[in-house]
């Protein structure tokens, strides 16, 4: 399986593309920029969804569903929002096809032109706030804590599976509050939820912070984000949470009668993560042998493979394997016993290794005699012989250990690839060699930020929360600066 | 709450429309024909999804995700399929907006016209079979048992919340098989899954059968369906499962090498249910006091309401209520304790009655003294006093009883509203008075079927599975007939 597989060293980008296809995670489709998420990839996404959904509900949110289409005029209502999204959207102009007069295929029926074009949602603030207007009258209707799981479309020109696709799946939370304070607290709470999910479930360490004005969401007052570092030294934004102020409430005339009987505009947040997380997950842990998955998100956590020569051996091994399977299942562990006789053990080893199954258990005739199994862990590729006594507890600990090890490894990597730069030369030298996060002074102007981006291809990933204030000089302009911010080249 | 609420007797259609809005299930949106599914309605849909998803996985299926868009040319590849869907689809023609030259809002950028238009999927057979071509080479790749949860768009001209909307949510299974026999067995298996779900979870009795050629899915060789009867005597198709033969395999050139090393076309099925089920659920059980939900799909199964005068009483009642809540939760029952002081008990009674919460428990000071509670069931509106001993077991039985009672009630209704007609007069008389299913002879021709539909507005809902053969004369044409089929006016 790992044959014809590019190494990270050779070409990181190609390694990623090949991995996604060969591990059966996703596929390109006949539609430009749109992907097919294959069953194995989708099973991981379902685990991501289930845990996030649980965390959203635990924090008081409920799900709802809003239309796929947004009337074109809605986009013009919030000035910076239209600026941010108008250039990359799919536009529905007609509602019918007809047989082609030449008898070949179908054409768009010119008589079925929409009066107002519809945009396939790139994000749903506008249609949702248009709806909230009728739902919110009084402070009693607040807060409104709603999340939506949906597909969205942004017409990206250069696409890559999971990382940047024209259509992607995501969740978008849209909340409405009576006060600014509550809305800010909500935006910060959801950032914490995302960070906890990234670290505890995806085993990806993230830095929390706010975006510079240039990188803010179109229509937000403040954009909070979590940023992760990939193995090639490029950063990846793994989630954003926006404090939207009263921008959308004003654009869509959403007011409420306060406890003091005053008519006030509603305060808003929105927050989202997408199938892009799949890209982050794949890139953070995988290696030249294929996918590596943290146990908490692996569709299959343990695979059991028999090694045998005779049918009689297989029968005895199967008995033992099914006992082990049952014991592991009692601990909530997902197990697959692969006794297919159409594939040899070696082929199976490669297959599950490539697909990132965290633990492989092998049982052969000698194991039966000794009451043992051979256990291999995917993260370190180490093998060990385990006594069968309390096997379920041992494997449970091993899975926890793998989960923690992946996180620590990624954390060390990030720490070893976070640098300080105090000059423009140093800054570029870091970016051109190791990459990674570069902590550097910036004069705080959008103009400088833009010039740095153009010349170095690095952007300000974030201004860390509770950032230390420190006198310094901007690495680019040399002007006075009050704090370092984190730069990186990014996905 | 039930004030200003139309009764079924007055106007069934208006009763339904008001119920959906007033029970907070769904709302109309700013986009023609597209609905907003509100949190309470979506919570029911999530329960439907969870159970169906479980049943699909138990029968060996996995989930995946395919693109929202389908290239226009794909529709022409399967002749009857394009005929069925071309007249009602949303067409994407452009991929960018631009600022209007007059400075007012945005317009579609004429330079951003797509080379080939994209159709927003009305169903995904074409894009999926185009993908399967690359996934299927050998008999080893079969069967492919894939399901997708997705949104689809059909440009309906007359829409109604849940029952007929331009955009709706659904699942669509698309399976590929090596033999005709296997594919037919799959289509029949999924029909059974749907019927089991409808009867055991939705408490809706359904009849299983096949569609007449006129009513077949566009591209299918055989369409299996389940049909339910609503309280106004109209039928509702609650799910379909199609045996597609080799039609899509041939249209998209999907062949496989058989065990005998022969290149053969793949056999296909597809099957789906949608948010239309919400409409069936609402219409089957609800009454003039509002929504009635079967316990297995109710987001809240039990609500506990305190009645008190003093804070001290409330404190004592809350202690007891929380004990009961804990006991019920231990049985997996979803409970809400509503101790809000902003609403009076009477208001709460109406609210939960209107929203169809199956069981209401009321605790007052006298109950505390007597060790009792008052229990009201939503289906019959009966009240009873329960001793607190083993309350969780009693409520568990009550919920089962309500579930079963709703099913039996709906079954009786259907049985009392299924008729035989042996003449055209009788046929029309039934349709114009009671409505319901009418079992009648039909000569088997599409022409007669069409004429019956035009003159009576009734369609052949299905030819029941294992239908009894019986000599007779077509009620319309008088020609010879070999079996009765079920007619009804339908949603």
Image (spheres, coloured by chain):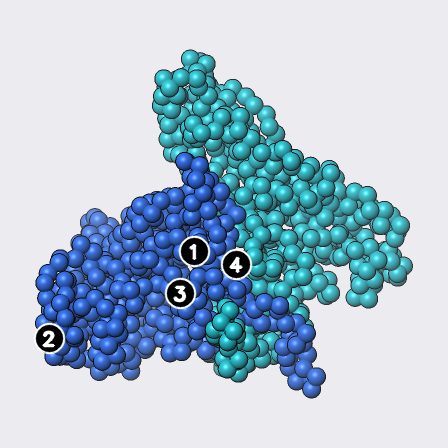
Chain colours: A cyan, B blue
Q: Which residue is mark 1?
A: B248
Callout 3 secondary element: helix
- Circle number at residue B423: 2
Sequence-wise, the earlier of marks 1 and 3 is 3
Residues at marks 1 and 4, CA–CA distance in whole angstroms: 18 Å
- Are labels 2 and 3 assigned to the same chain? yes
The image shows residue A131 at horizontal and vertical percentages of 48, 75
**In the shown orientation, is residue A471 left or right of residue B95?**
right
Sequence-wise, the earlier of marks 1 and 4 is 4
**Nearer-the-camera pick, B43 or B149:** B149
Residues at discs 1 and 4 in contact (Cβ within 8 Å)? no
Q: Which residue is mark 3?
A: B80
Subunit that carries the residue with mark 2: B
Residue at x-position 14% and y-position 71%:
B479
* Pair 4/2: label in front: 2
Callout 2 secondary element: loop
Subunit that carries the residue with mark 4: B
**Nearer-the-camera pick, A79 or B257:** B257
Q: Which residue is mark 4?
A: B67
In the displayed structure, B273 sits above or below B291; it is above
Subunit that carries the residue with mark 1: B
Residues at marks 4 and 2, CA–CA distance in whole angstroms: 50 Å
Residue at x-position 44% and y-position 73%:
B88
Residues at marks 3 and 4, CA–CA distance in whole angstroms: 22 Å
Residue A188 is at least partly visible in this image: no
Residue at x-position 36% and y-position 70%:
B162
Sequence-wise, the earlier of marks 1 and 2 is 1
């Amino acid at each position: 399986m790992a044959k014809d597989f590019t190494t990270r060293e050779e070409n990181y980008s190609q390694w990623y593309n090949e991995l996604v296809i060969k591990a059966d995670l996703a596929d390109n489709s006949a539609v430009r920029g749109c992907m097919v998420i294959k069953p194995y990839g989708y099973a991981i996404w379902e685990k991501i969804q289930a845990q996030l959904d649980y965390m959203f509900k635990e924090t008081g949110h409920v799900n709802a569903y809003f239309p796929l289409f947004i009337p074109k005029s809605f986009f013009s209502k919030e000035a910076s929002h239209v600026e941010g999204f108008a250039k990359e959207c799919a536009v529905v102009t007609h509602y019918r096809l007809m047989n082609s007069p030449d008898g070949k295929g179908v054409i768009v029926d010119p008589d079925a032109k929409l009066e107002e074009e519809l945009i396939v949602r790139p994000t749903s603030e506008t249609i949702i706030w248009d709806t909230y207007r009728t739902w919110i009258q009084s402070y009693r209707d607040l807060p409104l804590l709603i999340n939506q799981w949906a597909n969205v479309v942004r017409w990206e020109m250069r696409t890559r599976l999971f990382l940047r696709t024209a259509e992607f799946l995501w969740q978008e939370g849209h909340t409405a509050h009576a006060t600014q304070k509550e809305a800010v607290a909500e935006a910060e709470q959801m950032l914490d939820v995302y960070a906890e999910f990234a670290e505890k479930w995806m085993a990806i360490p993230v830095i929390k912070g706010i975006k510079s004005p240039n990188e803010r969401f179109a229509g937000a007052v403040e954009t909070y984000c979590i940023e992760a570092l990939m193995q090639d030294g490029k950063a990846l934004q793994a989630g954003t949470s926006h404090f939207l102020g009263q921008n959308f409430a004003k654009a869509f005339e959403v007011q409420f009668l306060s406890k003091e009987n005053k008519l006030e505009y509603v305060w808003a947040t929105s927050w989202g993560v997408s199938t892009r997380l799949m890209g982050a997950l794949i890139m953070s842990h995988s290696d030249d042998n294929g996918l590596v998955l943290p146990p908490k998100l692996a569709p299959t956590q343990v695979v059991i493979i028999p090694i045998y020569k005779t049918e009689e051996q297989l029968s005895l091994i199967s008995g033992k394997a099914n006992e082990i399977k049952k014991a592991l299942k009692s601990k909530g562990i997902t197990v697959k016993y692969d006794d297919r006789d159409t594939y040899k053990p070696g082929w199976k080893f490669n297959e599950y290794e490539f697909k990132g199954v965290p633990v492989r258990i092998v049982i052969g005739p000698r194991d039966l005699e000794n009451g043992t199994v051979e256990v291999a862990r995917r993260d370190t590729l180490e093998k060990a012989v385990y006594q069968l006594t309390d096997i379920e507890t041992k494997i449970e600990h091993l899975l926890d250990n793998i989960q923690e090890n992946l996180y620590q490894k990624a954390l060390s990597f990030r720490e070893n690839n976070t640098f300080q730069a105090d000059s423009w030369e140093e800054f570029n030298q870091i970016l051109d060699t190791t990459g990674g996060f570069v902590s550097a002074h910036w004069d705080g102007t959008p103009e400088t930020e833009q010039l740095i981006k153009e010349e170095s291809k690095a952007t300000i990933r974030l201004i860390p929360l509770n950032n230390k204030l420190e006198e310094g000089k901007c690495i680019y302009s040399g002007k006075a600066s009050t704090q370092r911010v984190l730069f990186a080249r990014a996905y």
